[in-house]
Amino acid sequence: MKENFVKAQPWLGLIARLTLGGVLFAAGFLKIDKIHESQMAVRGYEMFPTAISNAFGLFLPFVEIVIGTLLILGALTRAMAALGGLIMVAFVIAVAQAWARGLNIDCGCFGGGGEVAPGETKYLQVILRDAGLVFLAGYLIRYPLTKFSLDKKSNQESSQEDVA
C-alpha cells in the first residue's frame, strides 16, 4: 500500500499544486484590473480600518498571482504552499466572522464583493472550498515532490525520502 502511495504521490502533488495555484492565480487575475472593487470587497468584511483594508485590497491580487504562478510552475513549492495555505486560513476566518456577525456580503474571492441581499450569501460553500484548499496546501507542505516541478531535484529527492 505504501508503495502505491509513493508512486502516486508526485501525481497527487501535481493535482494539488495546480488546483491551489490555479485558484490563487485566477482569483488574483480576475481582480487585477478592478483594484477599486478588490478594496471594496475587503472593506466589506469590516475587520480593519479603511486604510488597511484598502492596502490589502490593493496588494492581495498581486500576491495571489505571484503565489499561484509559482505553484503552477512548481517553484518554491513548499514555501508557496505555506503562504497560500495561510491566505486560505485568513479567508476562512474572514468569511466566518462575517457570517457570525450577520454581514450580508459576497466574499469577493474572484472579483466583485460588497453587500448582497440577505439569503444570497454563500458563506458555508466558501468556507468549505477554502478549507479544502488549506488541506491541499498542507499536503504540498508535507509532500512538495510533484511531477513537472521546477524545484531542484535535490530538494525533491529529500522529500521523496520523507515519503518512504
Image: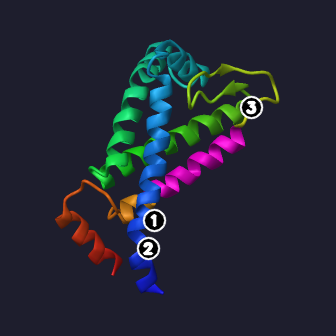
The answer to whether residue 86 is above or below residue 142 is: above
Instruction: State how far apart marks 3 and 1 are (Cα).
Output: 32 Å
**Mark sitting on residue 121:** 3
Front residue of 8 and 80: 8
Q: Please tell me which residue is depicted at 69% across the width and 44% down the height of the picture.
A: 125
Indicate the position of residue 104 as horizontal and vertical percent values. 73, 25
Q: Residue furthest right?
A: 119
Q: Tell me the chief SS of the magenta region.
A: helix
Q: Amino acid type of disc 2?
A: Ala
| Residue at the extreme front | 148
> Which residues are drawn in magenta?
123-137
Task: State the residue at coordinates (41%, 85%).
Answer: 3
Residue 24 drawn at (x, y percent)? 46, 39
What's the distance in space between the residues labelled 1 and 2, CA to CA? 6 Å
Magenta span contains residue 70: no
Q: Which of label 3 and label 1 is nearer to you?
A: 1
* Residue 63 placement: quadrant: top left
- Observer-side mark, 3 or 2, equals 2
Look at label 1 and name its amino acid: Leu
Label 2 crowd bin: few (<14), some (14–19), many (20+), radius 10 Å: few
Bin the neighbour count of mark 1 within 10 Å (Cα to Cα): few under 14, some 14-19, many 20 and up.
some
The dot on residue 12 is 1
Mark 1 or mark 3, which is nearer the start of the sequence? 1
Circle 2 is placed at which residue position? 8
Dot 2 falls on a residue whose secondary structure is helix
The stretch drawn in magenta includes residue 133:
yes
In this rendered view, identify the residue nearer to me: 84 or 95. Answer: 84
Q: Residue flagged by tag 3: what amino acid is it?
A: Thr
Q: Please identify the quadrant where the C terminus is shown.
A: bottom left
Q: Are marks 3 and 1 in contact (CB under 8 Å)?
A: no
